[in-house]
Image: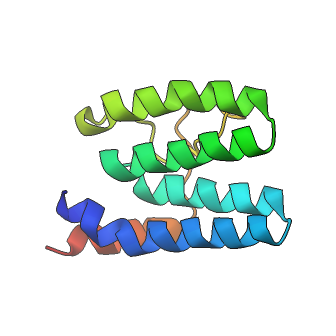
Amino acid sequence: MSNFAKNIAPYVEDELFKSKDAEASGNHSKAFNHLENAHILGQESTCWHVKVHFQMLLWGIRHKDYKEVFGQVIRVIGAAALTAIKGVPIGNTGGSNVSPVKVMPIKPEHAEIIAKVKEKP
C-alpha cells in the first residue's frame, strides 16, 4: 500500500462510516454524498478508489437503482485498471450521475486534506 493510501485511509474510512450511519438513519441521499466524499479523497489510491466504487455499487443494489449499479460496475473496472497510471479525472464525485471522465473542482476542505496527506512520508 502506498504512503498516500495509508495516510488518506482515516479520512476515507470516516466518510464510509458516515455513509453507513446516514443510511442506517434512513437518509439515503446523505449516505451517497458521503460515498462521493470518500471517492474524492481516495481516488488517487487504487485500493481506496476500487473500494469506494464497490460501496457505491452496493448502495445501488440496496436501493434498486439499476442505473447506479450498471455505472458502478463500469467504474469498478475502470478504477482497478486506470488509477495506478493516473487515468482518473481528479475531483470527479464517482456517481453514475456524472461522466466517468469529467474533471470536477475539489471542495477546499477536501483539497486541504489531500495536500496534507501528500506531504506526509
Q: Residue at image x 72%, y 34%?
A: 97
Q: Residue furthest left?
A: 121
Instruction: Give coordinates of residue 75: x percent, y percent.
Output: 51, 30
> 55 or 101, which lies in front?
55
- Whether residue 84 is visible, yes or no, is yes
Which quadrant of the figure contains the C terminus?
bottom left
Q: Foreground: 95 or 118?
A: 95
The foreground one among 80 and 26 is 26
Where in the figure is residue 57, as x and y percent of width and height?
61, 39
Figure check: 16 above or below 120: above
Residue at (71, 38) in percent of width and height = 61
Q: Quadrant of residue 114?
A: bottom left
Residue at point 39%, 53% (across, down): 48
Q: Which residue is located at x 25 percent, y 38 percent?
A: 84
Q: Horizontally, is 109 left or right of 65 in the view?
A: left
74 left or right of 23 in image: left
